[in-house]
């Protein structure tokens, strides 16, 4: 059974992945040292934290939450800090991703609540 601590680690993994992907966008194809280093280190941290979560959360569930929330947060970061536009279909799609994560989390019998 996953504890609150496990979910805290999953949130940490998601945050590290969002930072890594944001840095990756600024790395200019790994030609800029600082953002490249941040991306590599944060991806390593994200995967390490995710691997700890997989001790108690089933792989498909953990990865679904990690990737779904990560997609939505990356889109939000790109919109807020990089000025990338999100049209109506993009917002609807991101909303459906959030809905999917919530359905899995609160209604799935695949994980112990």
Image (spheres, rainbow, N blue to C red):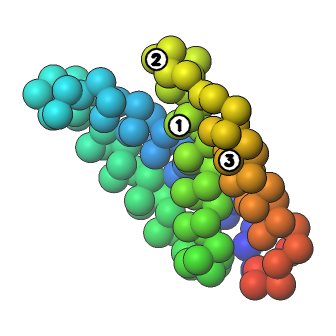
Quadrant that contains the N terminus:
bottom right
Q: Position of residue 33 (x, y in %)?
A: 15, 26
Q: Earlier in the sequence, mark 1 or mark 2?
A: 1
Residue at image location 70% in from the left, 33% down from the top: 88
Tell me how far mark 3 sits from mark 1, CA to CA. Answer: 14 Å
Residue 58 placement: quadrant: bottom right
- Give the quarter of the figure containing the C terminus: bottom right
Which one is in front, 61 or 10?
61
- Which numbered marker is on residue 74? 1
Q: Is residue 51 left or right of residue 99?
A: left
Give the numbered dot on residue 93: 3
C-alpha gap between disc 1 and disc 2: 11 Å
Name the secondary structure under disc 3. Answer: helix
> 22 or 15, which lies in front?
22
Please say whether residue 108 is visible from this viewpoint.
yes
Residue carrying label 2: 82
Asked which secondary structure carries label 2, the reply is helix
């Amino acid at each position: 059974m996953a504890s609150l601590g496990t979910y805290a680690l999953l949130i940490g993994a998601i945050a590290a992945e969002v930072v890594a992907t944001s840095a990756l966008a600024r790395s200019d194809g790994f030609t800029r040292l600082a953002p490249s280093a941040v991306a590599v280190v944060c991806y390593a941290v994200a995967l390490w934290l995710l691997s700890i979560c997989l001790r108690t959360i089933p792989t498909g569930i953990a990865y679904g939450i990690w990737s779904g929330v990560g997609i939505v947060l990356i889109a939000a970061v790109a919109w807020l800090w990089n000025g990338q536009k999100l049209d109506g279909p993009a917002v609807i799609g991101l909303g459906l991703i959030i809905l999917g994560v919530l359905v899995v989390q609160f209604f799935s019998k695949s994980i112990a609540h």
